[in-house]
Image: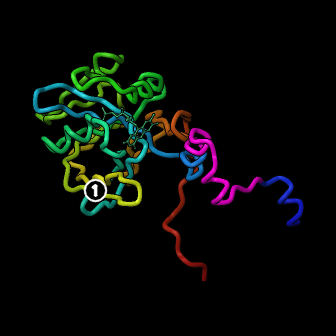
Amino acid sequence: MRLILLQFMEHFSKSKINSMERIFRLNLINSCTGYKSANLIGTSSNEGILNLAIFSSITHLGSDPSLLSFIVRPTIVPRDTYRNIISNHYFTVNHIHVDDIEDAHHTSARYPHKISEFDITKFETEYLNNFPAPYVKSSKIKLGCKFLNKYEIKENNTLLIVAEINDIYFEKDIISNDGYLQLDKAETVTVNGLDGYALPTLINRFKYAKPKK
Ligand SMILES: Cc1cc2nc3c(=O)[nH]c(=O)nc-3n(C[C@H](O)[C@H](O)[C@H](O)COP(=O)(O)O)c2cc1C
């Protein structure tokens, strides 16, 4: 059995991973931990220049209080999202609809600070309840968030941003009676690696798991 398995399984050891060509390793490591969330973060600079960028590291951190976190790459080059959040603390998180993947991906292009991705792509702004950061109009699930803290990840010079979820907007038919947002009803995409977008379908939900008697 072990022999058969080895015949079909590839194995990369640490030394092989370390000696890989850069882009090959980037694709491998970005995909080996599984599907990730894909969201657009909307911010505004203090001068009113809007910014929109795709992030795949946004994860819920806890529900009481309602927190999320995400990773900002090393700030050795200008990072508009990061700078805007640090200067005025508010940002939006917008799910990416299946019809929007091409433009969503394009928000990762490095445009100068003065150019807004809202002008370059088809995404339109939406302002809700006097929240200071722009939402994405076509997004079916969107969050209004406030920066709380940042933590330096010394191992690779990245930053972990922690924020509170202040507002949640979604189309009414997406939510179940128990509060669960069924993301396939929103046609929210997920990302495989850094450039592959997929549309998941819910298979089943299960009861809270308890040990078997
Ligand atoms: C699928 C995908 C996921 C990304 N996830 C992140 C991320 O989690 N953190 C990050 O710092 N950059 C991430 N990026 C890169 C940013 O989108 C890119 O650096 C963008 O230019 C940042 O824009 P800003 O300078 O306007 O903030 C991702 C790019 C792609 C294509």
Find the magenta span and give its range: 10-27
**Occupied quadrant, residue 76:** top left
Front one among 110 and 124: 110
Q: Residue at x 54, y 41 (%)?
A: 193
Ligand 1, seen in the image, is in the quarter at: top left
Percent from the top left, x then y, of residue 120? 33, 16
Percent from the top left, x then y, of residue 28? 60, 46
Q: Is residue 23 magenta?
A: yes
Q: Residue at x 54, y 60 (%)?
A: 206
Q: Determine if the C-beta at disc 1 is less than 8 A from ligand 1.
A: no
Amino acid identity at mark 1: Leu
Quarter of the image that includes the C terminus: bottom right
Front one among 12 and 15: 15
Quarter of the image that includes the N terminus: bottom right
Q: Is residue 170 visible?
A: no
Asked if residue 183 lies left or right of residue 10, the reply is: left
Percent from the top left, x then y, of residue 85? 20, 42
The prevailing secondary structure element of the residues shown in magenta is helix
Front one among 107 and 99: 107
Coloring scheme used: rainbow
Decide: is 211 above or below 31: below
- Helix, strand or loop at label 1? It is strand
Q: Residue furthest front?
A: 19
Q: Is residue 24 magenta?
A: yes
Q: Residue at x 42, y 22 (%)?
A: 103
Percent from the top left, x then y, of residue 166? 20, 48
Q: Which residue is mark 1?
A: 67
Asked if residue 104 lies left or right of residue 198, the reply is: left
Q: Is residue 167 visible?
A: yes
